[in-house]
Amino acid sequence: MKFIDEAKIEVIAGDGGNGVASFCREKFRPFGGPDGGDGGKGGSIFAIADRNINTLVDYRFAKMHRARHGENGRGSDCYGKGADDVYLRMPVGTLVIDQNDGAIIADLTEHDQIALLAKGGEGGWGNIHFKSSTNRAPRQKSDGKEGERRDLLLELKVLADVGLLGMPNAGKSTFIAAVSNARPKIADYPFTTLHPNLGVVRVSHEKSFVIADIPGLIEGAADGAGLGVQFLRHLQRTRLLLHIIDLAPFDGVDPVKEAKAIVKELKKYDESLHEKPRWLVLNKLDMVPADERVERVKSFVKRFGWKGPVFQISGLTREGCEDLVKEIYEYLATQRQQEQRDQSTMLEAARAITSIDIDDPRFKALD
């Protein structure tokens, strides 16, 4: 199946049915009174997150999604039938944006999460609602309201804990295949990866995390060179970035120059993504002579001016991969614990605010 991570659609909710002005006409009831029913509600359109879907390809060609109108009311106190709602199933991680004003309509981050995209119109009132002691034969009624119509942009941002960043042919696909259940295409030429790949890394039976591999970047990617930066959005939800470096490039290019080019393109695309925690992973250690490894690693780190964590691995032989995976899991576990503590602190503060007694003399003394 072709991977599609962006689509534009139009959603049109159903209009509400019209109310009716009607009067009872039955034998032996010459003054039966008003009996016009209300119109039915128009159908709404919802988005529902589905973890079994991993692409927006269904919306690449199905551009318009419309709900039915509600039925009109009828006499004899008959109300119009409301239209069924429409549910659009989308991958978890889909961001729904209004094309007209850029507002975020929904961010689908959990399985079975439901979000309203376009609300159906309310049904109109029949004349039974307008009768009173002074208006016993009302001829008023109201029409149903129009349903909402929106032009939407769907952006899929895959949900992963760790994202891989690097030049084409840096060994990202080899690494993700070595440590996870992902089986990406691997070859000895650049741009083998054409779309994001997700893999689950099992540290133990109950410990795991998700890693994402995106197509490689080159210098000028922000201006459209190579595959551009169209896939960088898939790294925005990650907690940690691994910058994979080819320590033994076959074409003789300078790894430091390429690494700096990646950082430059990252900053040009999104400042917040550039500030995200990032580790340096020096790959293809097996292709460097054993007696040259220490000196080459020191030289690279010094010339690159790197102050953060540095790991040396070989995705092909899996040397150093196990230690790196353990370090990643420990870091993610610490991050999750910190987020839980922050959330608990916020909840306690919210409870404290809601439990304040404004009649307490201590607060009156502040007036």
Image (cartoon, grey):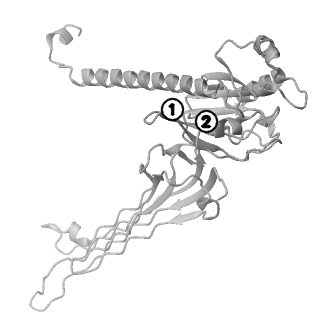
Disc 2 element: helix
Type of amino acid at the residue the image marks with label 2: Val
Left or right: 129, with 27 as reference point = right
Residue at the image position 21 percent from the left and 71 percent from the top: 128
Q: Is residue 101 visible?
A: yes
What residue sits right under mark 1 in the picture?
Answer: 203
Q: Is residue 14 left or right of residue 264?
A: left
Residues at marks 1 and 2, CA–CA distance in whole angstroms: 9 Å
Q: Position of residue 253 (x, y in %)?
A: 89, 27
Q: Is residue 100 visible?
A: no
Left or right of 78? Residue 272 is right
Above-or-below relation of 241 to 212: above
How many numbered marks have been drawn onto this rendered protein structure?
2
**Counting other residues with Cα less than 10 Å from the Cα at mark 2, is it few (<14), some (14-19), or many (20 or more)?**
many
Is 79 above or below relative to 355?
A: below
Residue pointed to by mark 2: 179
Q: Position of residue 57 (x, y in %)?
A: 62, 58
